[in-house]
Amino acid sequence: MVRRVAPQFSIPPPPRTEVMLGSNLTLKCVAFGSPMPTVKWKKGLTKWLTPEDNPPLGLNTLKLEDIRESANYTCEAASVLGVIETTAEVKVQYAEAVIINLKLSSQNLLIVNDKTAA
């Protein structure tokens, strides 16, 4: 007799990851059970990122490239014995803008190697 086991995560994605604007990130999600569950990713609440026709079994790696916005990515593992989910928050860190105000009189300024010469 085959033992039946509901889906469980063995390697869930990290709950929160901070990345710089424009960077890449790989999220890995591993689940097990008997029968082996399908593992799918979605962005936000409704946008499925894994093709519905042939979702992978047990492991699904999500590759994010040129990340421009913070978002939640949910990994779902499902079999006939149940559905489980875990969410990974990807938070984009924007480089702080440095604003320099130069008040010019009648002289011209030339900036070379971070040094100012008149």
Image (spheres, rainbow, N blue to C red):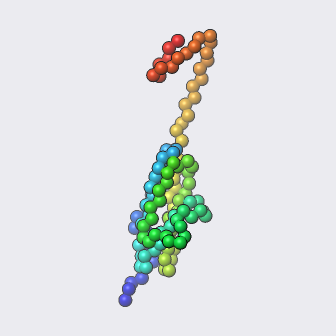
> Residue 11 occupies which quadrant of the picture?
bottom left
Image location (x, y in percent) of residue 69: 57, 49
- Closer to the camera, 61 or 29? 61
Report the residue at 54% width, 41% height from top.
94
Q: 99 above or below 19?
A: above
Image location (x, y in percent) of residue 48: 57, 64
Q: Is residue 76 visible?
A: yes
Q: Is residue 85 visible?
A: no
Residue that sits furthest to the front in the current view: 53
Q: Is residue 35 left or right of residue 73?
A: left
> Residue 45 occupies which quadrant of the picture?
bottom right
User: Which quadrant does the N terminus fall into?
Assistant: bottom left
Q: 55 above or below 68?
A: below
Q: 63 above or below 112?
A: below
Image location (x, y in percent) of residue 30: 42, 66
Residue that sits furthest to the bottom in the current view: 1
Residue that sits furthest to the top in the current view: 106
Residue that sits furthest to the left in the current view: 1
Image location (x, y in percent) of residue 92: 53, 47
- Closer to the camera, 16 or 113? 113
Report the residue at 55% width, 34% height from top.
97
Number of marks: 0
Report the residue at 55% width, 31% height from top.
98
Q: 31 above or below 113?
A: below
Report the residue at 44% width, 61% height from top.
61
